[in-house]
């Protein structure tokens, strides 16, 4: 079952004579979307969002709930005007929001047990079950499954599975009309929701893609969807960072080190096309087939003439540039490297790295 966060705003659960509640709830939804773009409106005054990805990103479920409460309280002007709950499955999450409770994973059945059967939203069951002495969801869950199905039918059997904590969703928990109305209201506020445009901006396709990516993160974790960003560094592997999509660091405007910042020992352009996740061992020799080394002064012991990668055949070097020495981690264990750009006569160009007397292929230029 999905682990969900549910928010309930009691003062917005029904629309008053002036009809201000939907617009106020829309502001609440936008405040929640600042934490996660995948927000689902289940009914007026109630919305849900995935718990797994955002809670990891914002420091755990308790911290995430606290931050959501503060954000919504700023919109409504009252911290008591919102209930936030976390549980496994939509049904339990909605009840958790009513009681302002975070239900531990796997504890859904125990949490649901004391609730009256009327919370299932089934009038027939709410009348019939108490007549049979079944007043709570825990008592309902204790009934044999086959008897519930035979006596009350398939829908009651689905309610029974929810009461037992085996499933988390029920027909009727969502009100599509409210979601459609909020989308129409959102169209009246173009400065809040990105609209499709001819010249830049965010399109509807971007919005749909964002929701899909957020859904993937909810199911697989925040690290399952990443984006590439440039950062400071000397080698290409250091400069390329994969960050969770939607995180603050993934925003190009929040890059910790501008692209033009000085980095002694940084490679000159052009940048490699392919950066290897695992560098491949290489051997570099001179004209006399002697190993080429990088001296303590950062110079080559001889001009490189041939290169072998992964123990394969040697290829002739047509041109080379470097070496580019770099010393990292001077404050702890010093790491000295040198990089060499080589062009092969047979075609192609490689970026080599020398460290502790050994060469490796770090990247390729084509």
Image: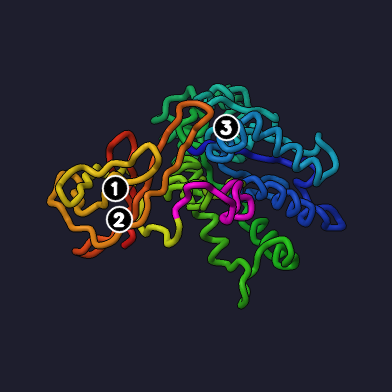
Secondary structure of residue under mark 2:
strand
Q: Residue 44's x, y, as percent?
A: 71, 50
Q: Is residue 251 left or right of residue 266?
A: right
Q: Position of residue 130 (x, y in %)?
A: 61, 27
**Is disc 1 in contact with disc 2, using a CB cutoff of under 8 Å?**
yes
> SS for tag 1?
strand
* Residues at discs 2 and 3 in contact (Cβ within 8 Å): no
Label 3: few (<14), some (14–19) or many (≥20) C-alpha neighbours in 10 Å:
many
Q: CA distance from mark 1 to mark 2?
A: 7 Å
Provide the residue designation for mark 1: 361
Labels 3, 1: front one? 1
Answer yes or no: is residue 349 visible. no
Q: What whole-number distance in Å separates the C-alpha atoms at marks 2 and 3?
A: 52 Å
Q: Nearer the viewer, residue 355 or 304?
A: 304
Q: Residue under circle 2?
A: 350
- Is 259 placed above or below 63 here? below
Q: Nearer the viewer, residue 358 or 204?
A: 358
In primary-sequence order, the first of circles 1 and 2 is 2
- The verdict on residue 101 being magenta is no
Classify mark 2: residues with Cα within 10 Å, few (<14), some (14-19) or many (20+). many
The residue stretch that appears in magenta: 249-267
Q: Residue at point 46% right, 27% down?
A: 333
Q: Is residue 258 magenta?
A: yes
Residue at the spot of label 3: 87
Question: Cα distance, mark 3 to mark 1?
Answer: 49 Å
Q: Residue at x 21, y 44 (%)?
A: 283
């Amino acid at each position: 079952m999905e682990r969900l966060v549910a928010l309930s705003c009691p003062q917005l659960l029904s629309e008053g004579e002036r009809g201000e509640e939907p617009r106020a709830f829309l502001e609440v939804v936008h405040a929640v979307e600042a934490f996660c773009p995948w927000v689902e409106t289940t009914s007026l005054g109630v919305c849900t969002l995935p718990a797994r990805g955002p809670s990891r990103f914002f420091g755990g479920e308790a911290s995430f709930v606290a931050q959501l409460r503060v954000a919504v309280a700023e919109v409504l002007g009252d911290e008591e005007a919102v209930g936030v709950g976390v549980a496994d499955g939509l049904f339990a999450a909605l009840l958790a929001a009513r009681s302002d409770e975070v239900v531990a994973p796997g504890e859904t059945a125990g949490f649901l047990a004391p609730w009256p059967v009327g919370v299932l939203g089934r009038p027939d069951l709410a009348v019939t079950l108490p007549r049979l002495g079944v007043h709570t969801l825990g008592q309902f869950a204790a009934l044999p499954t086959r008897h519930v199905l035979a006596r009350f039918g398939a829908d009651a059997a689905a309610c029974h599975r929810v009461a037992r904590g085996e499933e988390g969703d029920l027909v009727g928990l969502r009100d599509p009309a409210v979601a459609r109305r909020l989308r129409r209201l959102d169209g009246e506020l173009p400065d809040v929701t990105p609209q499709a445009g001819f010249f830049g901006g965010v399109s509807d396709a971007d919005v749909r893609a964002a929701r899909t990516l957020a859904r993937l993160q909810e199911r697989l974790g925040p690290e399952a969807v990443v984006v590439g960003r440039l950062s400071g560094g000397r080698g290409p592997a250091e400069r390329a960072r994969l960050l969770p999509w939607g995180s603050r660091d993934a925003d190009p405007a929040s890059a910790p080190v501008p692209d033009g910042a000085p980095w002694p020992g940084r490679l000159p352009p052009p940048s490699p096309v392919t950066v290897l996740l695992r560098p491949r061992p290489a051997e570099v020799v001179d004209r006399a087939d002697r190993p080429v080394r990088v001296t303590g002064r950062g110079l080559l012991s001889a001009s490189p003439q041939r290169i072998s990668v992964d123990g394969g055949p040697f290829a002739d070097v047509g041109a080379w540039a470097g070496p580019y020495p770099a010393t990292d981690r001077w404050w702890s264990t010093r790491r000295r490297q040198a990089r060499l750009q080589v062009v092969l006569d047979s075609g192609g160009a490689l970026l080599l790295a020398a460290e502790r007397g050994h060469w490796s292929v770090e990247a390729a230029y084509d």
